[in-house]
């Protein structure tokens, strides 16, 4: 994340402040039963989804390619098939950049096309070398083409494919020289031996590359396991609300960074957090684990949202004492916490230097929920004595609360213009939170040309 304007006076961060206090919750409550992990599917929800699908008068209608239809217009097309239920902590397939329905960046498509072209080149080189040798006088040589074929095949083909390409190059070299003499002369033998040696080296290179690929695949599996442990995917329904989350890392092949989210059902309502840790790398991941762990415990035990924020502040202070260098003195986390009381059409928001949430109404109206008093990010409370204060807003039925990190609001296009989620989502409607997040992620990718400059975490909660 960028340090930016930490007081919330900039155009993208409007924090709030509040007074913290709280008492411990009932100890006999089991936090895991309300945690944000993936739970078994809700039969009622499944039957409701089935009835909605059956009532669709036009099942063949194509889905809306943009951000969804305007209210009162044509209904959106059928949603993508839902992902299979995962384990309690399994976000990698639906929260990372490889999630179903995730936008495919333009650079990724171009890279795939280039790889397909490269896979054809070894065969073209072998065939081209043979044609060149046959069609030219004896003094010309096609050895460069024959030697290049197996070398190019080594990182692209399997071991068998590389070996076949090498043999084809050696046979092609011999066939070219056999055209001029049944018994190869010294120059011909030299070329044949050279091509054969290069083909053997290509086979060795292929084995080394394959072992590297295996280690990379193992590292990716470990990264996915780490993400499942640190950022578990919330269940589709928590505390009677429809919930969806999405995480996309800006770094290629990265699964987790410094952005975070968590959802917890507690005796006082459903509590949420979305945040962005300063910095990158394993230090940021460690801070994410600390914050989420502290949040889940505090959300269950503390009576108020202000007290939860204070618990997070103390947890980060303890973590800072175990760090060295810049993170020990300047580590911080921007965050926004929310509380949805049971049976009450309200939402309480507590800002800590983070972009404000958006409230999307069924009629397409989008209303930001900014902080009326600025507040410092978590981890910087000692710099100013500003008590936390949660601010309450109405959260009517059918509305959706959208929380996001600055990877959305600070995404830029080629002209340097920031992405404005309030403007881009205004006047649109969505079937459910998952459809909202998928459409928003696609639109952000289109805005910045396919690549992200910063990680992007999204969390949407809809009141049925």
Image (cartoon, rainbow, N blue to C red):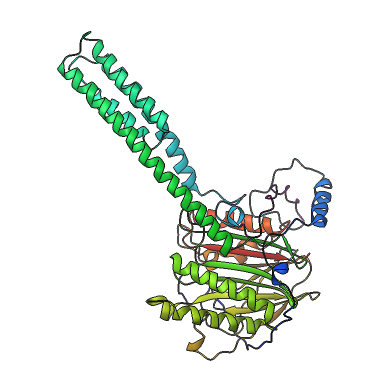
**How many numbered marks, from 0 up?**
0
Q: Position of residue 80 (x, y in %)?
A: 69, 48
In this view, the residue in front, 19 or 413, is 19
Q: Examine the rendered structure and indicate whether residue 184 appears above or below residue 76.
A: above
Give the quarter of the figure containing the C terminus. Answer: bottom right
Q: Examine the rendered structure and indicate whether residue 423 appears above or below residue 201.
A: below
Q: Residue furthest front?
A: 28
Q: Position of residue 104 (x, y in %)?
A: 54, 48
In this view, the residue in front, 417 or 461, is 461
The residue positioned 67% from the left and 87% from the top of the image is 22
Q: What segment carries the magenta color?
A: 72-90
Residue 6: tell me if it is visible.
Answer: no
The residue positioned 51% from the left and 49% from the top of the image is 105
Q: Position of residue 36 (x, y in %)?
A: 67, 65
Q: Position of residue 337 (x, y in %)?
A: 63, 76
The residue positioned 50% from the left and 89% from the top of the image is 384
Say if the magenta span includes residue 347: no
Residue 387: tell me if it is visible.
Answer: yes
In this view, the residue in front, 103 or 30, is 30
Q: Main secondary structure of the magenta part?
A: loop
The residue positioned 76% from the left and 51% from the top of the image is 75
Say if the magenta span includes residue 79: yes
Q: Examine the rendered structure and indicate whether residue 450 appears above or below residue 458.
A: above
Residue 195 location, quadrant? top left
Q: Residue furthest left?
A: 186
Residue 233 location, quadrant? bottom right
């Amino acid at each position: 994340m960028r340090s930016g304007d930490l007081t919330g006076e900039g155009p993208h961060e409007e924090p709030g402040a509040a007074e913290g206090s709280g008492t411990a919750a009932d100890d006999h409550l089991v936090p895991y039963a309300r945690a944000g992990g993936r739970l078994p599917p809700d039969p009622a929800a499944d039957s409701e989804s089935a009835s909605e699908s059956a009532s669709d008068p036009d099942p063949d209608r194509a889905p809306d390619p943009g951000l969804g239809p305007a209210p009162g217009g044509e209904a959106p097309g059928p949603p993508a098939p839902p992902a299979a239920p995962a384990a309690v902590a399994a976000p990698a397939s639906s929260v990372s950049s490889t999630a179903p329905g995730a936008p495919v960046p333009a650079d990724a498509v171009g890279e795939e096309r280039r790889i397909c072209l490269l896979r054809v080149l070894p065969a073209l080189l072998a065939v081209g070398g043979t044609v060149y040798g046959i069609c030219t006088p004896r003094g010309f040589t096609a050895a460069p083409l024959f030697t290049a074929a197996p070398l190019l095949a080594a990182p692209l083909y399997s071991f068998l494919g590389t070996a076949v390409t090498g043999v084809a190059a050696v046979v092609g070299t011999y066939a070219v020289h056999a055209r001029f003499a049944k018994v190869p002369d010294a120059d011909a033998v030299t070329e044949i031996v050279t091509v054969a040696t290069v083909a053997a080296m290509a086979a060795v290179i292929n084995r080394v590359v394959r072992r590297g690929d295996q280690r990379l695949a193992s590292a990716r599996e470990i990264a996915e396991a780490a993400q499942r442990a640190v950022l578990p995917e919330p269940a589709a329904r928590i505390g009677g609300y429809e919930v969806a989350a999405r995480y996309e890392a800006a770094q290629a092949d990265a699964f987790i960074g410094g952005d975070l989210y968590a959802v917890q059902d507690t005796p006082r309502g459903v509590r949420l957090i979305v945040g962005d840790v300063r910095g990158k790398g394993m230090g940021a991941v460690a801070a994410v684990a600390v914050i989420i762990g502290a949040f889940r415990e505090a959300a269950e035990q503390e009576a108020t949202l202000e007290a939860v924020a204070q618990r997070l502040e103390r947890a980060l202070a303890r973590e800072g004492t175990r760090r060295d260098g810049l993170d020990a003195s300047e580590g911080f986390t921007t965050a926004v916490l929310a509380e949805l009381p049971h049976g009450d059409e309200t939402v309480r928001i507590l800002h800590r230097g983070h972009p404000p949430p958006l409230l999307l109404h069924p009629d397409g109206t989008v209303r930001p929920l900014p902080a009326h008093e600025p507040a410092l990010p978590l981890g910087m409370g000692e710099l100013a004595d500003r008590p936390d204060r949660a601010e309450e807003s109405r959260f009517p039925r059918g509305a959706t609360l959208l929380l996001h990190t600055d990877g959305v609001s600070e995404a830029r296009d080629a002209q340097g213009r920031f992405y404005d989620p309030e403007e881009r989502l205004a006047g649109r409607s969505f079937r459910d939170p998952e459809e909202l997040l998928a459409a928003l992620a696609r639109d952000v990718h289109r805005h910045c040309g396919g690549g992200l400059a910063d990680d992007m975490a999204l969390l949407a909660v809809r009141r049925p």
